Every structure is written in structure tokens, then in C-alpha cells.
């Protein structure tokens, strides 16, 4: 009996300890009165951690009394979103500065979770227009652009030259070159892109829709169903049917499609800028044979890329808003962006850096990327973007797999998005 | 001390309390909370929850995506469970027979079940790859398994059957081995062939266990999430979106806690109904 009591009390002690620890999560770490610690939540930077750490130490040296603790988030974007939502909704003050995907800013701003940082933004002209749009909600700015991304067209210079084509400027030029070369070169596909039902498909399809003059939202109004959008979706559906793209694009995400092109088995690839460095690695079979250009457009319209990338925001409940602001200013400064770009290959958000000799020498594709970024568009900036994207993902997927006729999918998407936007 | 002990001995409730409190906190409270949420409009994006009665369920009834997900779930459950039981039973009967290397074989059969689902699904995703996947290579086909609306669901079912059949085989093997060999010997003496022995000995004696396996597998298949989510993400065009994937997307991506909870409650009611039906069958079988 005594043993049983002992076991029980020990069990209770453990339970109390566990609950106690869980309850202590919110307690601020001990600080000296003259020293303030800010916590920076960010996605993991791939590569040598030293340059990033050195940057944080430099900030601390320049701002005596402020210490920075950098904490990484889970790898998957969905999980990062979940982490932020759960913690910010719970009023957490455990972190001060946060890295935000471009499509989350409006959502978090509406919820009142991130602070107005309008004063921290550089001159509007210093940024890409789409990047500025993505951090703007109801006329105010809620995050500072940090890194940017945009869809690019990669092509095989050698194959185009061999078969007498030049880099395509319109979608029909691309289709013709892709079809012809794929027919003449055994084992080589035409145009590969990302057609699996996921966020990447929304980017791919919107790029086509924009480059035909279509759009999803005009303010709060849903303007998706239009002759322009229909034209783009009909072209999208015809890609597989007409032999421009292989059927495998309907399951492809970024990496499988990069793999096909990177092993020399495709003429054209739509992908993000990260692929460039990988194609130019010494062991790459297509090293030196790859050209990069802004995405094609339909006749009479202009090229458009989907904007991706990351912004820095400040937790609205931060205990140290001034220190957090100083840190955001530092991390988005030209010097910090140059350092991070050289070390990790991320593309700076400041336009001026695309003419920086040191950066250009390391990453010559920045010139093409700047053109693409100037023509980039942000995905619909609305707090309901996540819901909207789910509708677009399934309807676009129905189009690329041939399950629905483009007109039908478009009508369904229009109706569903109208319902979402009309919710209170 | 002795008196304290005696007093405690008279109060079993005091001993049960910690367990009851933990259960209440981690099980009972969340269930009640989800039920309440399903009657509310509640988005995590800043608004406070507001009670809307049965609105969410009315919306559910006319939601084409819900019915699509329900259809997908039922189809997936029916086909995968039937195949798993049939193949699992065959494996169990084979593994019950004496042959050289039987112990090793029993271990090998269990392997797929021991691999974490997400890892297995990633593996199958590469095997199904339409461009360089090993399945097309072996079959000499060029099928776009996961990108084709007809093939995608069946590809997911095939993976689930591969993954879950060992579990069925193992339980049925245990059941088969608990049947006394004397019965088979007696049957043989009476001149019964293998089919009659199966029909009149193995089958009736395995039936209660078979029903339990059916309950486990049906509930497991009905709630399928990770295998399909990794393979296709619910695509193409929602043709592999099951109820769990739909609920996940509404709850954790769109953050509509009210409507998402209504979907979860619907899943709960369906699973409870199926289980109740099986339990009745089980009682009849036991009689």
C-alpha cells in the first residue's frame, strides 16, 4: 500500500511538473534591465549558417543593449502558417519579428496581428510594384519586403538554335517551338511546368491569365469570368492535348519539373529563380546551355509573373516594438540583402541591387529576373486568399486534366469565389 | 499514516480522479468544444465566434465538394477494405501452413506495415512517377498514375492495400493458429477436403475476429488522410479528396473553424454509425 501511495504521489508530481512547464512557456526570459532581447522567427536558410549569424552579431554590435535570438520554423509553408496563426491568435508575445510569405500579409493585417510598419518601408520606387502591393492592406503597409521571387521561363539555348528558333516572346511561339523540337528530338519533352493541384498551379495558371489580360479580383469584385481568362485556360488545357507539354505536368511540382529539365529532357521550363544556380552547377548536364527570360504572353498583352517571396513583419503585441523596427530596418537594408543574396542565393527586394556589380558577377540571371519582377503581379491581396486559392486549385486542376471544359470550370470558380467574398 | 491510508482506501474516487481529470481535459473537453464550434461561425482571422445554429450543416447538405469527398471516402473504404480482408485472409491461411522459412516469411510480410505512412507514401509517389517511375518501367506502360482522374484514386487504394494488408494478415493468422488442430484432424478422418474444412471450421471460428478486423480497417480507411495527402494532395481536381483531407483544408488552411468542425462532426457521426452496425453484427455472430 505504501508503494502504491508513493507511486501515485510521484505520478502526480510528474504531472504537476509537466503542466507547470507547459504553463511557463509564456514567461519572458530573464533580462538585465539595460538589455532587451528580440526574437526573430524565420524559415530555415539553406546553406552555411555562418553569414546569417554574423549578420545578427553585426546588428547587435551596432545597437548596444539589443540582443537578437533567431528561431527557425518548420520547413513546410503550411506548417509555418499554422504556427503563426495559433500563436498570434493566442496573443503570444514570444516573438517580435516574423518572416511572412507574400500571400499571408493581408490575412494577418486584417486580424490585427501584425503592426503597421509604413514608416519602415523604403521609397516606393525602390521596390517592385507587385512587392509593394503584397504588403499593402487598406492603404497601409504591414510588412517590409525582404526577398522576392517570380516565375521565369528557362529554355535550352542549344536546342532552339539547332532547330532554328529564337527565345519565344508569345505563348504561341513557345507552343510551336516546343511541339516541333519535341517531335524531332526523341526523349525530349516540350514545355514542363507545375500542374499538380496545389498553390504552384495557381501561380502557373494566373501567369497565363494575366498575360492574356484577365484577373481574379478588381477590389472586392470578382472579375474572373471573362473572355481573356477563358482564352488563357483554353490554351492551358490544349498544352497536353496538343503535345506541347507531356502528361506528367499534371502531377508535377517545382522539383520534379526541374529534374526533367535539369537532366536535359525538356526544351522549356517554367520555374522560380532558384533553379538557375542548380542548372549552372559543375555536374549539371545542361550547364551553359540554359537561357532565362520573362514568361511569354498572348498577342497584344504583356508578360506577367506570379510574385513569391518573403516579407518581415512585427508582432503587434511585441514588448519591444522600437527594437523590432530597428532590426527590420537593418535586415532589409541594402548591405544585409546583398550579404544574404551572396550567401544564400535569395533575390533582394530592392531594385537597385539588381545593378550591383558584385551581385551581378555572382548571379548573371539577375538581369532577366529584374525584368520579370518589374512585370510581376501579386496574387489576389485579400484576407480570404487561402479559401480563394482552394477553389482555384481544384478548378484549374480540372482544366489541366481535361475533367472540365474551361468555360465550365471558370463559371464554377466565379460562383464559388463570389460566395466566399460575400461572406460576412 | 495508517489512518490516512484507510481513509483513502474508502474513497476510490480519490485514486481515479487524476486519470479522470486527464481524460476529461484531453478527450471530453475537445469533443464538446468541436460540437459547439460546429454550431458557430468562427474564423481564426480575428472574429469572435458567433452562434449560428444548424447553418453549417445546412450549408454542408448543399456543398458539392462535401458530397464529392464523401463519395471518394466511401469508394476508397469499400474497395480497399474488401481487398485487404481478402488478401490478408489468403496470407494468413498460407502462413499457417508449415513450410521452410515460415518464421522469416511472417516477418517479411509485416514490413510494409512497419514503415511510417508518410515515408511509404513518398516512396510510392516516386514509384508512380509517370516519367521515370519504376511501376511504368515494370509494366511497360506510360500511365500518368497520380495525374489521371481515373487512375489517381486506384493508385492510392493500391498503396493502402499494400500498407494495411499485413495488419489484417497478422491478426487473422493469430486467430487461425488459435483454432485447435484436433478439429482439422477429426475433419480429415471424416473425409472432409480442404474446402469443407475451411467452410465449416476455419470460417465460423474466425468470424468474430474477422468482424473486429473489419471494424479496425473500416474506421482506419474512412479517416484516411496522410497516405492520400502525400500522394496527390486531393488532386487532380479533388478526385482523391477524402473527408479528412477536406476537413484539414478547411480547418488548417482556410482557418474556418466553424464549418471545418461541422465536417469533422459529420465524419464522427458516420464512423459511429458504421461502428454501431458492426457491433450489432458482432453480437449476432457471438450468439
Image: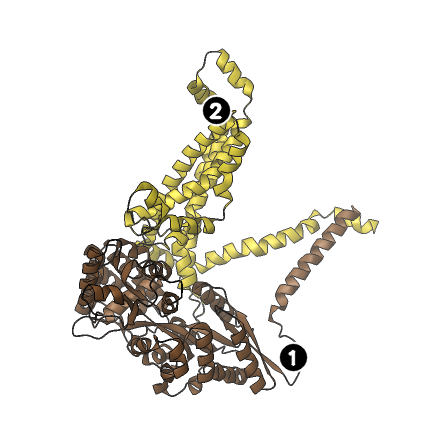
Chain colours: A brown, B yellow
Asked whether, in this view, residue A301 is left or right of residue A25, the answer is left
Q: Secondary structure at mark 1?
A: loop
Vertical side of B111 occupied by B38: above or below: below
Q: Which residue is mark 1?
A: A31
At 43% across and 61% down in the image, what residue appears? Answer: B252
At 70% across and 51% down in the image, what residue appears? Answer: B14
The quadrant in which residue A338 appears is bottom left
In the rendering, at what x and y percent does residue A158 appear?
A: 26, 65
Vertical side of A275 occupied by A374: above or below: below
In the rendering, at what x and y percent does residue A390 appear?
A: 34, 62
Q: Nearer the viewer, residue A153 or B278?
A: A153
Cα–Cα gap, marks 2 and 1: 72 Å
Asked whether, in this view, residue A297 is left or right of residue A335, the answer is left
Q: Which residue is mark 2?
A: B202
Disc 2 + disc 1, Cβ < 8 Å:
no
The quadrant in which residue B65 appears is bottom left
Q: Nearer the viewer, residue B38 or B146?
A: B146
| Disc assigned to residue B28 | none
In the rendering, at what x and y percent does residue A335 appear?
A: 46, 84
At 35% across and 49% down in the image, what residue appears? Answer: B133
Give neighbour class at mark 1: few <14, some 14-19, many 20+ (Cα, 10 Å). few
Q: Nearer the viewer, residue A139 or B138?
A: B138
Amino acid at each position: 500500500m505504501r508503494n502504491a501511495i508513493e507511486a501515485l504521489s510521484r505520478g502526480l508530481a510528474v504531472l504537476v511538473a509537466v503542466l507547470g512547464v507547459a504553463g511557463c512557456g509564456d514567461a519572458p526570459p530573464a533580462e538585465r534591465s539595460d538589455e532587451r532581447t528580440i526574437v526573430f522567427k524565420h524559415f530555415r536558410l539553406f546553406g552555411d549558417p555562418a553569414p546569417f549569424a554574423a549578420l545578427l552579431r553585426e546588428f547587435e554590435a551596432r545597437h548596444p543593449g539589443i540582443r537578437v535570438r533567431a528561431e527557425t520554423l518548420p520547413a513546410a509553408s503550411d506548417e509555418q502558417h499554422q504556427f503563426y496563426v495559433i500563436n498570434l491568435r493566442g496573443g503570444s508575445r514570444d516573438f517580435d519579428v516574423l518572416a511572412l510569405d507574400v500571400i499571408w500579409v493581408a490575412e494577418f493585417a486584417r486580424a490585427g496581428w501584425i503592426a503597421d510598419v509604413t514608416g519602415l518601408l523604403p521609397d516606393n520606387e525602390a521596390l517592385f510594384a507587385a512587392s509593394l502591393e503584397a504588403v499593402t492592406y487598406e492603404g497601409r503597409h504591414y510588412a517590409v519586403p525582404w526577398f522576392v521571387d517570380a516565375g521565369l521561363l528557362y529554355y535550352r539555348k542549344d536546342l532552339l538554335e539547332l532547330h532554328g528558333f529564337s527565345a519565344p516572346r508569345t505563348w504561341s511561339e513557345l507552343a510551336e517551338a516546343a511541339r516541333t523540337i519535341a517531335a524531332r528530338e526523341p526523349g525530349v519533352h516540350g514545355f514542363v511546368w507545375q500542374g499538380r493541384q496545389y498553390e504552384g498551379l495557381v501561380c502557373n495558371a494566373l501567369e497565363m491569365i494575366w498575360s492574356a489580360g484577365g484577373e481574379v479580383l478588381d477590389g472586392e469584385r470578382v472579375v474572373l469570368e471573362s473572355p481573356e481568362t477563358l482564352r488563357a485556360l483554353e490554351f492551358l488545357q490544349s498544352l497536353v492535348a496538343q503535345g506541347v507539354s507531356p502528361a506528367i505536368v499534371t502531377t508535377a511540382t517545382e522539383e520534379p519539373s526541374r529534374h526533367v529539365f535539369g537532366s536535359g529532357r525538356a526544351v522549356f521550363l517554367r520555374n522560380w529563380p532558384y533553379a538557375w544556380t542548380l542548372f549552372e552547377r559543375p555536374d549539371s548536364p545542361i550547364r551553359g546551355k540554359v537561357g532565362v527570360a520573362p514568361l511569354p504572353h498572348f498577342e497584344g498583352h504583356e508578360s506577367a509573373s506570379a510574385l513569391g517571396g518573403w516579407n518581415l513583419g512585427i508582432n503587434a503585441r511585441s514588448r519591444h516594438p522600437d527594437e523590432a523596427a530597428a532590426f527590420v530596418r537593418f535586415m532589409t537594408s541594402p548591405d544585409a540583402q546583398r550579404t544574404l543574396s551572396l550567401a544564400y542565393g535569395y533575390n533582394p527586394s530592392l531594385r537597385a541591387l539588381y545593378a550591383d556589380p558584385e551581385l551581378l558577377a555572382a548571379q548573371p540571371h539577375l538581369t532577366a529576373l529584374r525584368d520579370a519582377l518589374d512585370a510581376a503581379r501579386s496574387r489576389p491581396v485579400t484576407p480570404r486568399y487561402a479559401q480563394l486559392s482552394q477553389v482555384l486549385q481544384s478548378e484549374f486542376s480540372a482544366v489541366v486534366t481535361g475533367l472540365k471544359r474551361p468555360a465550365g470550370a471558370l463559371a464554377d470558380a466565379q460562383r464559388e469565389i463570389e460566395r466566399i467574398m460575400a461572406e460576412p | 499514516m495508517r489512518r490516512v491510508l484507510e481513509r483513502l482506501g474508502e474513497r476510490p474516487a480519490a485514486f481515479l480522479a487524476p486519470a479522470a481529470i486527464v481524460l476529461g481535459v484531453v478527450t471530453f473537453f475537445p469533443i464538446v468544444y468541436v460540437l459547439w464550434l460546429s454550431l458557430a461561425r468562427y474564423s481564426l482571422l480575428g472574429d469572435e465566434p458567433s452562434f449560428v445554429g444548424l447553418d453549417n450543416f445546412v450549408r454542408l447538405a448543399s456543398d458539392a465538394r462535401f458530397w464529392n469527398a464523401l463519395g471518394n471516402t466511401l469508394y476508397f473504404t469499400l474497395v480497399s477494405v474488401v481487398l485487404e480482408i481478402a488478401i490478408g485472409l489468403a496470407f494468413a491461411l498460407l502462413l499457417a501452413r508449415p513450410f521452410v522459412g515460415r518464421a522469416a516469411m511472417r516477418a517479411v510480410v509485416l514490413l510494409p506495415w512497419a514503415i511510417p505512412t508518410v515515408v511509404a507514401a513518398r516512396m510510392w509517389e516516386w514509384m508512380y512517377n509517370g516519367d521515370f517511375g519504376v511501376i511504368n518501367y515494370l509494366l511497360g506502360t506510360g500511365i500518368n498514375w497520380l495525374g489521371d482522374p481515373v487512375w489517381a484514386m486506384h493508385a492510392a487504394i493500391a498503396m493502402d492495400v499494400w500498407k494495411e494488408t499485413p495488419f489484417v494478415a497478422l491478426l487473422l493468422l493469430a486467430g487461425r493458429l488459435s483454432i485447435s488442430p484436433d478439429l482439422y484432424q477429426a475433419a480429415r478422418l471424416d473425409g472432409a477436403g480442404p474446402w469443407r474444412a475451411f467452410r465449416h471450421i476455419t470460417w465460423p471460428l474466425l468470424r468474430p475476429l474477422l468482424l473486429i478486423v473489419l471494424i479496425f480497417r473500416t474506421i482506419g480507411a474512412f479517416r484516411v488522410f496522410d497516405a492520400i495527402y502525400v500522394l496527390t494532395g486531393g488532386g487532380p481536381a479533388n478526385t482523391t479528396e477524402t473527408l479528412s483531407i477536406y476537413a484539414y483544408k478547411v480547418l488548417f488552411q482556410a482557418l474556418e473553424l466553424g464549418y471545418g468542425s461541422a465536417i469533422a462532426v459529420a465524419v464522427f457521426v458516420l464512423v459511429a454509425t458504421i461502428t454501431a452496425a458492426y457491433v450489432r453484427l458482432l453480437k449476432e455472430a457471438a450468439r
